[in-house]
Image (cartoon, helix red, strand yellow):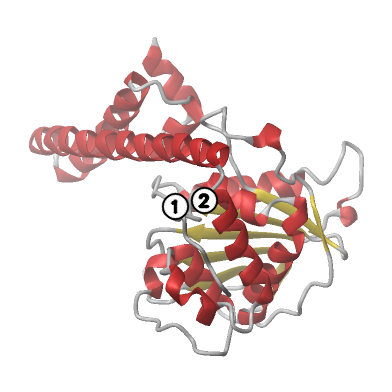
Amino acid sequence: MELILLVEMLDPRNDFLFKRIFGSEENRDVLLTFLNRTFEEAGKPPLTEIVLLNPYTDKDAPRDKQSILDIRARTSEGQLINVEMQLFNKYDMDKRTLFYWSKQYAGQLYEGQSYKLLRKCVTINILNYSFLPNSRYHNVFHLTEDRTGIPFSDDMELHFLELPKLDEHEIPADSGGLVNWLLFLKGSNPSQWEVLAMNEPGLKKAMTTLEFLSQDKEARLQYEARQKYLHDEASMIEGAREEGLKLGKAEGKAEGKAEGKAEGKVEGERQKAIEIARNMLNMGLEIEVIAKASGLSESEVRALKV
């Protein structure tokens, strides 16, 4: 694959760019191949066809800074798939995953319809940070019985693809597969693209799309605006957490001396959450984002505004 690099290549981990590459109608085959590589590695049968439920259009340009640029698709069997790229750790991935999975699952039915109409929902989170306490870059979760492993239902399937855990993987010479796609997303040097795409025609198309977008003036402006927002949001959340941790720790120690270590620890955690929420309120973040980051309920966060 011959590449002419006229400008610096943009980062495909930016969720706006990720959706342009994988969530546009003209690149539906790219998404299908990526999904099949993901399912193949998890021992699942391949998909034959998908329908994009929220394909990228010019109206999806990130003018609304707090928009969620995920990709939603439906298979020929009616299963629903949600794919999301997370560039920074917002410290709420477990709750966020369950929340949006449950909305997608419940959203299939109108009032009065039978539960039998519900179809399997699959969530695929691509994370630019380590999340789970193991060394595997691809983890898959289902609902099973603790001791026997008997499945309760196959309707829930959660995939976590953690890009930092690919550090020890060398570029496969000719095998292809999910690792090649993730190395591309992680930001492999374009000089290595030909090797990565050797047996992955869909990946080659994704690379060509990224090259085109990197040279498109309007796309670069939208990318840079989104990148700035993502960096600013991450800095605000991290700053609020650090400040809350300091204050919560100090107040927790004081409470511990006065009322006992156990009660002091609980109160300290509570104060830490409140300080995090207050800092984030002062930064102008949305109630929903603050609640997820602090662990408080939305009503508790609203009460802090009074």
Out of 80 and 253, give the one closest to the viewer.
80
The residue depicted at 38 percent of the width and 72 percent of the height is 165
Out of 303 and 257, give the one closest to the viewer.
303
Out of 110 and 91, give the one closest to the viewer.
91
Q: Position of residue 300 (x, y in %)?
A: 43, 24
Q: CA distance from mark 2 to mark 1?
A: 7 Å
Task: Identify the residue under disc 1.
Answer: 7
Three-letter amino acid code at the position of disc 1 = Val
Q: Would you say the residues marked 2 and 1 are in contact, meaning their CB atoms lie under 8 Å apart?
A: yes
Q: Position of residue 253 (x, y in %)?
A: 11, 38
Answer whether residue 239 is visible to the viewer in this image.
yes
Task: Identify the residue under disc 2.
Answer: 214
Three-letter amino acid code at the position of disc 2 = Ser
Count of residue discs = 2
Element type at marker 1?
A: loop
Element type at marker 2?
A: helix
Is 255 on the left-hand or right-hand side of 72? left
Is 93 on the left-hand or right-hand side of 98? left
